[in-house]
Image: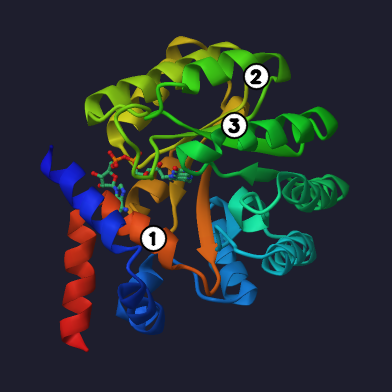
Amino acid sequence: MELNNLARSVVLGVSNNTVVHSFATKYGLSLGAGRFVAGETLETAIEAVKTLNSKGISATLDHLGESVPSKKLAAGASQECLYLIDAIERTGVDCNASLKLTQMGLDIDQEFCKENVEQIVQRASEKNNFVRIDIEDSPRIDATIEIFKYLKEKYPDNVGLALQSYLYRTLEDMKRLAYLKPNYRFVKGAYKEPKEVAYPQKQDVDENLKRIIGIHLKEGNYTAVASHDENIINFTKDFVKKNNIPKTQYEFQMLYGICQGLQEQLAQEGYKVRIYVPYGKDWYPYFSRRLAERPANIMFIMKNMFKH
Ligand SMILES: Cc1cc2nc3c(=O)[nH]c(=O)nc-3n(C[C@H](O)[C@H](O)[C@H](O)COP(=O)(O)OP(=O)(O)OC[C@H]3O[C@@H](n4cnc5c(N)ncnc54)[C@H](O)[C@@H]3O)c2cc1C
């Protein structure tokens, strides 16, 4: 196993430990998680979006939360998402919304989850806005695609989906959904997946990412390239140039607090850049995935702990 894969596996494994979870939730934001999370309230997140907008960068706001265990919590999460969409309109920021289906009750009742998300997408359609459905771990993909299909048929301009290049199945999923002309966000994938479903080698994940970006762009679909990897970004820049793909058909996306220099540089070069801005109290699982992606981030947190 590669060293990075090993570190990722360990961090994602330890993150499920309840003692680690409660310690981190208590002290984490002040110990460094604040680098990746734009605060715990919608107000602080909107301020972060305004700062990005002032640099010519768009945003997508995500009210953090996933795998909620009750309908009550899921209903609360979908209510927060409605506030979020209203706040975007009220403040006039250049921003849309991202959400996770397990936060809207996917693990409890698929139909209930669909209704929750439909309310949000419907509100976005009334406000001329857009909702991106994040993609979670592999056991949830079929249900996620089913809900996406339903919403995309009903609200064609207001909903998109993220897809992961580490999964063997992604290209087949794209073929099945091609008739919908989806708006996808392409990512490498952030969960711990077995080799039966996902490429274990980074090189294969990267190659598949390039392949699916190229196919989707060539088919004339809107494409969000969500990566901090300069190889992927440069591949996209070359591909759009060679194939005369207009700037209105794609955007680059990155995560809040990661590779800020690159984010600003792309915006200055005239590319559309959108930053995923997460906020809220339930930031721990998101934060664990950011640590797992880059072992150096663990050192950053350790240094902060010793400073305190
Ligand atoms: C906007 C956006 C939305 C996403 N949505 C989803 C989703 O819905 N589902 C999902 O499974 N995954 C999602 N991801 C995460 C994604 O799957 C990857 O895990 C993550 O982006 C790291 O991969 P990379 O493409 O940046 O390339 P990598 O090869 O992992 O990294 C390339 C370089 O980027 C920098 N970098 C990458 N990650 C970090 C980090 N955590 N901290 C510091 N530097 C870093 C490093 O310099 C690294 O060398 C999303 C990512 C982005 C940018």
* Mark in the foreground, 2 or 3: 3
Q: Amino acid at mark 2?
A: Leu
Q: Position of residue 132 (x, y in %)?
A: 63, 43
Q: Where does label 2 land, which residue? A: 177
In the drawing, does residue 152 fall left or right of residue 200?
Answer: right
Q: Position of residue 40 (x, y in %)?
A: 54, 76
Name the residue: 39% across, 73% down.
34
Of mark 1 and mark 3, the one earlier in the sequence is: 3
Vertical position of residue 229 compared to residue 37: above or below: above
Quadrant of the image occupied by residue 241: top left
Callout 2–callout 3 Cβ contact below 8 Å: no
From the image, tell me which residue sits under label 3.
Answer: 142
Please tell me which residue is depicted at 47% across the width and 68% down the height of the picture.
Answer: 283
Which residue is drawn at the image coordinates 82% and 35% (left, top)?
155
Residue where numbered disc 1 is placed:
257
Q: x, y percentage for residue 243?
A: 49, 10
